[in-house]
Amino acid sequence: MTVTLSANTQRLQTAEANLASDEAGASTGALASQWDQDLANTVDSSSEAAADAEVAALPSSDPDHIAQATSAQAYIKAKMASAGNPVSVANPFAGLSQSALAAIANDKSGLYTSYEKSAAVDESMDQTTAWVMKYASDTQGQEAGFFQAAQQQYSQLSPLQQSVYPADYMKALKQLENEQSNAVKTPDIAGDASNPKKADAKVAAPATASDAAQADTASNGGPASSISASNPDDPTDPNGSTAADILTITAALALPPGDILNLVA
């Protein structure tokens, strides 16, 4: 039996292949800078007319693309007019994987219109915000499975999206998961300048992808940010806020510069 893929499915497969090729040959710092640009280059009032022209210029021979682009256009226009309030217009990319959303947002070959790329960025941010809010009350990292869930969330990102996270983020999460499974309360990885023993246990996370790119190191081509799982001198400190720090990193790095959500106290 022959299976024929829709034009939009084929388009997405091509975009994913293009992104994988770009990721394979780029340093972490370069990827971080690129993702920063992808998040920032969305349709606004100054680019709306040009974005409308892109949709109008789509060939009639590709009705699937016209339908998808028109849906993205309607969604972004509704968002622009909503002043930050929820909209009833559906995002055509709702529920798509993070890696697929990154491939659309990062498209440089003309596969997608500006409205589609903007809708992909918006869905990526919405998914990340929803994940952060799910665990936002777990400030001590005591909810069972939190650190495993954080690893899963990170693993679902494309290398492009992962590039803006601290260099040893996954390693720290695994160590924190082990500590949690052993019922050992973890210390505050945000650090505490008043306690010399805790000063080295900190997260040095970039506020934006741009900051990650600027922190690029000559040794490994990636951000110099680091994250320590625990303080061996004080492994049972009761004032831990490990989960809150991880949630703050996740929220901050998922959003465009100048639009960081303060979701966790």
Image (tube, grey):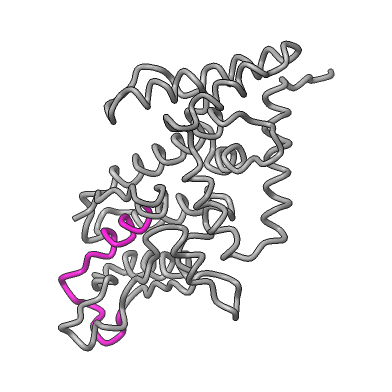
**Residue at 53% across, 60% down:** 163
**Picture layout, residue 191 above or below residue 145:** below
Location of residue 9 (image quadrant): top right
**Residue at 59% across, 58% down:** 31
**Residue at 36% across, 54% down:** 252
**Picture layout, residue 124 above or below residue 58:** below
Was residue 4 drawn as part of the magenta stretch in this picture? no
Q: Is residue 56 left or right of residue 92?
A: right
**Picture layout, residue 228 above or below residue 139:** below
**Picture layout, residue 178 above or below residue 101:** below
Location of residue 11 (image quadrant): top right
**Residue 214 x, y percent position in the rendering:** 49, 68
**What span is in magenta?**
231-250
Front residue of 216 and 130: 216
**Residue at 19% across, 76% down:** 237
Location of residue 8 (image quadrant): top right
**Residue 223 x, y percent position in the rendering:** 50, 70
Front residue of 56 and 235: 56
